[in-house]
Amino acid sequence: MATTETPAPRQMTVIYNREDKIFRGVVTGGALTSLIVLGLIGVFLFMRGAQIFGDKGIQFITGTNWTAGSGDGVIPDDFSIGAMLVGTIVVSLIALVIAVPLAIGGALYLEFYAPRRIRRTLVTLLDLAASIPSLIFGLWGIEIFTGFGERWAVLINNWLGFIPIFSVEFDNFGRSPFIAGCVLGSLIIPITTSVAREVYSRTPRDLVDTCYALGGNKWGALRAVVIPYGKSGVIGGAMLGLGRALGETVAVYLLLNLVFRYNFRILESEGGNVASLIATKFGEATEYELNALVAAGFVLFLLTLVVNMTATTIVQRSTPRA
Amino acid sequence: MSTTMSSETAATVEPQTPWSTPRAIRIRTTSVVALSAAFAVVVVLFTGVAGIDGWAITFMGLSIVVVLARTSRAGSKERKDALMRVIITSAAVTAFAPWLSIFGSVILKGYLGIRPNFFSQDMRTTTPDDFLEFGGALHAIVGSLLMVLIASAITLPLGILSGVYLTEVRGRLTFLVRFVVQSMSGVPSIVAGLFIYTTWVTATESFSAFAGALALAVLMLPTVARTAEEVLKLVPEDLRAAGYALGARQWRTAFMVVIPTVRSGLTTAAILGVARVIGETAPLLLTSLSNSALRFHPFDGPIASLPTYVFGYLQIGTEYAIARAWTGSLVLLAIVFVLFTLARRFGGKDKR
């Protein structure tokens, strides 16, 4: 059989004329919109919040009060988001602790264990789950999941109540950061699972087969090749999930009572996060309080931006592009 | 075309598996699984363990015990392998359980309110506690569609330009643009709402559908841009070369060869963008508020939307209000699924 050799493509010399230059300019402009919008978000939120940052300084981030003044100066305005920042981080960490192991398990199952017949269905289900609006997660959380969550909370409190974070002041287990964390966990499982599955599926097939050839079994191959290979991708996926959990509004709004104090007891019926604070107080806020809410939004924006940029860097590094 | 076809068939050849599990062993495994499942039912019925979650946890625990017992005479490697198979499968089942529960509960609780009036009436003259035969979500559906349409009209050109920049122009900012688009997809939805509130709503001194659409556009842009890039990357380099060889300038090649080739892929990008934002609630709470009457004007005052409809009635919390919220969720979920199926349909076209 005669094989025809394909010659290597020749170097193309490109000279852009005026039309092309206009085209390239317009396209570049369009592509830069996202950069501009991202910048504008930062600038406008900061400008509106600057007054609060000036008035409160670092106290805005560390304090726990959110008191709207009486207007006549008898009770002064006092706005700070320390308690809500702690709440944001606590709930997101619970979500991560729940979601990451399950997502890794789910991804490994889909790639290596699932029977071929149901695999395709499960992948479709995964994609669909990633597009369920968080509002529906919140509705499900408050109407369906709370019943299960309360029961688990009572069990955890019974057996592990001596550990401070599992203790409670009042015997009321509903509306706790634990329940909100579980719901946020199920909210971020899809995105974390699909990123993990993506990197696991890129594991060089040869390496896995080599493991089998050396007499290794499936878990041997997973532990020696697949899991180390996908590690940074999974970390990136987990951080993308974290970014979503940090900024989640309605699900947390529906599941937690806003209480303005540092709360590390995750089974206690109090909590809140920055995003749900904004949604709660927005309706009846005075001008000054609105500025404080925007300032809170700015802090949240910075927080999620840092998390997401780190995640993006990790994911892009671990998935080399052609 | 033929080369891609043959490589695809080559990739899907099934490996022969003469070592696959014999029938007897398969029957034994199935019966062991069924027995532990039945035993877990007994545990739930006669001990303090309760509910389907208690059953599932008991079942998983039992499976681990059974596996350990069965591999007690095997080597440690085999034991670990069998144990990890159970653990990973359990993790996968646990990961999938909430979604199944969500789909199930939304359908079961939502379908009660699916009546003709739900799609033909608004809530202007109906109180939340009226029977479900009265009132509907027409205003919310119309409001959502209006905002999503405006948002798409803004986002689609920008997203495509972004994709074209990354695949055709390939300028010096390629890395930066890709990075920013990725990071922007993580902007919390409430922040997008606050941004539009501090700019458009403050400037025009009015909440409106257009403000809501702007907030949705901020959230939609990254999805559209990224999908557009993925799709445009599929265009073979040969097609571009052919365009140039015919004497076309770069812009003509881009607009008359590259983009038409992936037209249905770009439709997918738009649909996925819409699916991403149709259920967003938080930004609308700050930009378009809600309304109980049917309205069409994009610039004039608060307007209803499906997410704020669900959110609002859930807040009211009475029996019929919550039933309306479930039905609203069902409609929302149905829209997302339809969009998703459409996206798959269109997405499949270009590749074949």
Image: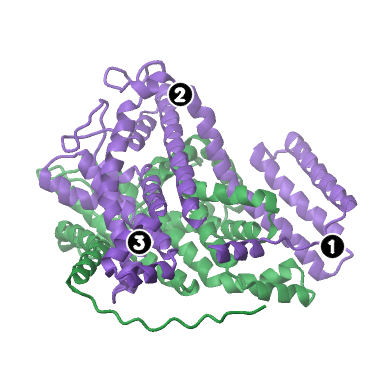
Residue in the foreground of this view, choosing between A318 and A62: A318
The residue wearing badge 2 is B114
User: Are tags 3 and 2 found on a single chain?
Assistant: yes
Which residue extends farthest left?
A72
Q: What's under tag 2, amino acid-wise?
A: Ile
Q: Is residue A255 above or below residue B255?
A: above
The residue wearing badge 3 is B257
Q: Is residue A199 above or below residue B301?
A: below
Q: What secondary structure is found at the residue carrying circle 1?
A: loop
Rendered image quadrant of residue B45:
top right
Chain letter for mark 1, please: B
The residue wearing badge 1 is B19
Alpha-carbon neighbours of circle 1 within 10 Å: few (<14), some, or many (≥20)? few
Alpha-carbon neighbours of circle 3 within 10 Å: few (<14), some, or many (≥20)? some
Which circle's residue, 2 or 1, is located before the other in the chain? 1
Q: Nearer the viewer, mark 3 or mark 1?
A: 3
Rendered image quadrant of residue A98:
bottom right
**Labels 2 & 1 near each other (Cβ < 8 A):** no
